[in-house]
Amino acid sequence: MFDPPPHAPDALAPGQLLARGVCRHLRGHDFVTLPEFTPERGKRLDVMALGPKGELWVIECKSSRADFTSDAKWEGYLEWGDRYFWAVDEGFPTDLLPEGTGLIIADAYDAEILRMGPEVKLPPARRKAVTQRFARHAALRLQSLRDPGLVL
């Protein structure tokens, strides 16, 4: 028996499957995405999306009620993007989600934005720093795919 490759659907956790559907959907809106993006030490965003006009969206994927209720740090993620979204599956009790946030219904293959999160533009210095970090993360991931033995 062999282990499935890391990109195979059965090798991904439920939240990662939601993130994949979100990333696929956002690509159709000309956004590029980085799953599991770390804007600073101690913070990990499920999906960071960069739009065609430089807009930055933060998407947190919640696969269950327990996953959502155990997350006490989500409000600290608001300062990293222009909009904030929850991505959940169609069976998730969406009445749990805070008002004033965006809502995306997703599965492993696609998603739909049901509610836009309010836009709160990042300050220019923060936008520049996050965009540069996004670019560096993307480049490092590409380099590690092309040269898996390289220590990054």
Image (cartoon, helix red, strand yellow):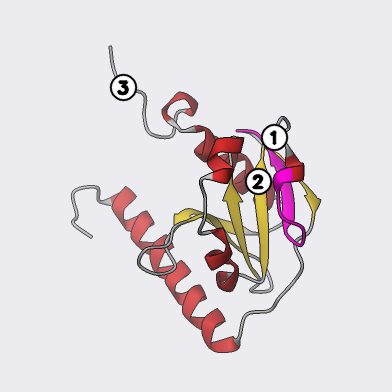
Asked which secondary structure carries label 3, the reply is loop
Q: Which-is-in-front pick, marks 1 and 2?
A: 1
Q: Seen from this angle, which residue lies furthest top?
A: 1
In the picture of the structure, the residue carrying the numbered disc 3 is 3
Front residue of 129/95: it is 95
Quadrant holding the N terminus:
top left
Marks 1 & 2, CB-CB < 8 Å contact: no
Q: Which-is-in-front pick, marks 1 and 3?
A: 1
At x 61%, y 86%, the residue is: 123
Kindly indicate the quadrant of the structure image that contains residue 139. Answer: bottom left
Tell me, for residue 92, which label it has, or none: 1
Looking at the picture, which amino acid does disc 3 mark? Asp
At x 68%, y 58%, the residue is: 30
**139 over 53 or under it: above or below:** above
Looking at the picture, which amino acid does disc 2 mark? Ala
Q: Callout 2 environment at 10 Å: few (<14), some (14 to 19), or many (20+)?
A: many
Q: Which-is-in-front pick, marks 2 and 3?
A: 2
Mark 2 vs mark 3, CA separation in Å? 28 Å
Kindly indicate the quadrant of the structure image that contains residue 59. Answer: bottom right
From the viewer's perspective, is 112 left or right of 67?
right
At x 70%, y 49%, the residue is: 97
Mark 1 vs mark 2, CA separation in Å? 10 Å
**46 over 89 or under it: above or below:** below
Looking at the rendering, the stretch of residues picked out in magenta corresponds to 96-108
Q: Position of residue 86 (x, y in %)?
A: 66, 50
Marks 2 & 3, CB-CB < 8 Å contact: no
Front residue of 54/44: it is 44
Tell me, for residue 129, which label it has, or none: none
In the picture of the structure, the residue carrying the numbered disc 2 is 87
